[in-house]
Amino acid sequence: MTSINGSLYAMHPLQWRMLESELADIVGWSHVLRDEVDRSVYALDIFWLPRMVVDRGELPPLPDVVVLPGTVEELAAVVRLANVYRIPLIPWGGGSGSQGGIMPVYGGITVDLKRLNRLIKVNASSQTVTAQAGINGYDLECALNAQGFTLPHYPASVHSATLGGYLAARGSGVLSTKYGKAEDMVLSVQVVLPNGDIIRTLPLPNHAAGPGMLQVFVGAEGSFGIITEATMQIEALPQERRFYAMLFDDLSSGLEAGRPM
């Protein structure tokens, strides 16, 4: 027995109807995507494998249903429901990953976090920003620039990636050699655990009491919990920016020239 969409775990079609109805009770029918054309969007990121399947005229594995929660409490309820039915759940940010982490190889529920996109607070004196994990990276950067700040994390995917994606993938960017990676900028996170509990890490990244839980979630790509909010260290916008291009005879010469910098 399989799901109505052909997943690899046993579930009666009637159970799927019940599940979809319960999901709609949580987020509303308009935020439950069931059509194949909608679910196909969530079957691939930038990873080459599912794109190869599509190029050959076939469909990669699809999620059985896609849900877009509008609050952290809705997300937690969806996670608890997935536990009741014992089916996979995959968090989705901007779909810009390059390793296929969002591929629903066993079907299940894909949870799109882009409705959790609020900029909560910019603390100018502490130079921190708190925002929900579904906020688009470029939108966040524009909002900070308007207040004279920058989050100096510039991945190639900045126009499509989300803040949560920065952290879930332990991302780096073109300025990481100066400012550090996303993991170095994060101060605290709010997380929905696999059982549906909502927790916050301590409001400072380094402390002397007990193990540091923050980095358990950073880089885990949702395996240990879904990041829903983060407080990040930001920097003042530089007064001036200059860009240079340099040519070298070979790669080795270029690498050696960069070492002293």
Image (cartoon, rainbow, N blue to C red):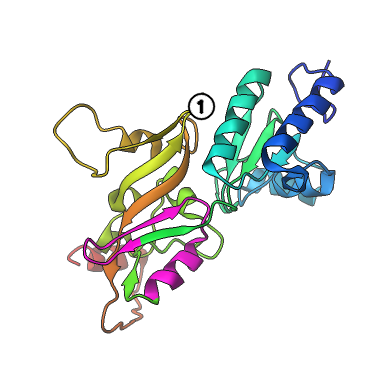
Question: Mark 1 belongs to which amino acid?
Answer: Pro
Judging depth in this view, the residue of 158 and 226 nearest the camera is 226
> Residue 178 location, x and y as percent?
25, 63
**Residue extending furthest front?**
25
Q: Which quarter of the figure has residue 106?
A: top right
**Residue 40 appears left or right of 72:** right
Q: Residue 178: tell me if it is visible.
A: yes
Seen at 67% across and 23% down, the residue is 87
Please report the bounds of the magenta region as a residue range: 122-145
Crowding around mark 1 (Cα neighbors within 10 Å: few <14, some 14 to 19, many 20+) is: some
Give me the residue at 31% from left, 32% from top: 213
Say what secondary structure mark 1 lies in: loop
Vertical relation: 245 (above or below) 224? below
The verdict on residue 124 being magenta is yes
Quadrant of residue 14 in the image?
A: top right
Front in this rendered view, residue 7 or 19: 19
Question: Residue 122, percent across and down?
Answer: 34, 63
Residue labelled with disc 1: 194
Q: Does residue 19 lie above or below 207 as drawn? A: above
Q: Residue at x 26, y 83 (%)?
A: 239
Query: Residue at the spot x=58%, y=47% of the render?
Result: 113
* Horizontal relation, residue 84 to residue 152: left or right: right
**Whole-percent x and y of residue 227?**
46, 41
